[in-house]
Image: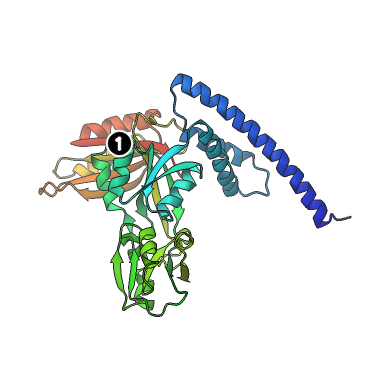
Amino acid sequence: MSKSLADLRVQIDAVDRQLLTLLNQRAALANEVGEIKRAEGSPVFRPDREAQVISGLQAANPGPLKDTSVASIWREVMSACRALEAPQRVAYLGPAGTFSEEAALQYFGSSIEHVRCGSFDEVFRATAAGTAEFGVVAVENSTEGVVARTLDLFLNTPLHVIGETSLLVRHNLMRLSPSLEGIEVVLAHPQALAQCQGWLNTHLPGAERRAVSSNAEGARLAATNPAWAGIAGERAAAQFGLHIAAHAIQDDAYNRTRFAVICLPQTLPLPEATGKDCVSLIVSVPNRPGAVHDLLVPLKQHGVSMTRFESRPARSGQWEYYFYIDIAGHPSQPNMAAALKDLQGLCAFFKILGAYPVAE
């Protein structure tokens, strides 16, 4: 005999209460852990530990929950438990409703203190000054490539990278009206305007494209003028009371942005190895034939895989460049340690930006 809807709801209510009891038991244990950490002076947030917890739960997951759902649920559980010890202050490109905010919530969970900043420069400054414990900054986009300003800021900062997260970015055109008629200006971050240029060329060829500090700022401004439209995520439309006049206008349907999580080394030292890690470097080499080729030799000799290689001008007037490199592994691994040592010996400038768990 099949169960009725009322019977199933009674069972769900009973399970929910069991879950609530277990979650509070977990929170109580987390409080005890927090007391030990405070006595030892160790950090509240450990991205390597949290990555291992989620990975272990996904491996043990019998279904029907998807592994991605398990990760999302436990990230929120751990965020709520961390907040009982001390909520993390997280800086990101604001105002509310940006993709940077979404990335911060995806990485840390929703139990954080928000530090909204007007630019990437301000995110770096707030994090370096201790106004925020952590910062979240866009590093690269699958359509437009690297975020140049972020790479430039990495060069001279005392901050290091302790994590990353990748966000599927869906850009929406939003305004006070649900129609496309009468739009004179489209406002968004330069990256968003570039990622939607094909759609804009086709549907709004006569509209001015105006770059602003963030997509959420574009949405905020669009709420002040009926002839203006912003490009942003759905969170921004809800935040500023706008209609979405066109959904998912990005030229690449699988448009993703990668974000780096940054902090001072005294806030959180180098995360321990998880088995799925990345080391980020900035290097420069003497301006001589074969110098860039020589950078690759230690990686090959020690069996280390390079996953990203970008160049930025050194602004010295001498046609010199800094190279931003990601390599798979962790400095605690002998072959990685040997490769880094040999690589440093070849470089005129060498800086480890961070070592951190790779985003799934």
Of residues 7 and 182, the one nearer the viewer is 182
Q: Report whether residue 246 is seen.
A: no
Q: In which quarter of the image is residue 337?
A: top left
Which residue lies under the disc numbered 1?
Answer: 129
Q: Which residue lies furthest to the left in this view?
A: 317
Q: Which amino acid does label 1 sit on?
A: Ala
Whether 178 is drawn above or below 109: the answer is below
Q: Where residue 73 appears, x then y in whole percent?
A: 59, 45
Q: Where residue 29 appears, x then y in whole percent?
A: 60, 27
Of residues 200 and 212, the one nearer the viewer is 212
In-image side of 78 versus 329 (left or right): right
Provide the secondary structure element on which disc 1 rests. Answer: helix
Q: Quadrant of residue 130?
A: top left
Q: Which colour scheme appears in the figure?
A: rainbow
Total numbered labels placed on residues in the image: 1
Look at 30% across and 37% down and name the residue there: 128
Look at 34% across and 75% down and name the residue there: 201
Q: Residue furthest right?
A: 1
Q: In which quadrant is the N terminus drawn?
A: bottom right
Q: Report whether residue 138 is seen.
A: yes
Whether 58 is drawn above or below 143: the answer is above
Q: Quadrant of residue 240?
A: bottom left
Look at 36% across and 63% down and name the residue there: 218
Q: Where residue 147 appears, x then y in whole percent?
A: 31, 53
Q: Which residue lies furthest to the top in this view?
A: 39
Q: Where residue 122 appears, x then y in whole percent?
A: 29, 46
Of residues 26 and 331, the one nearer the viewer is 26
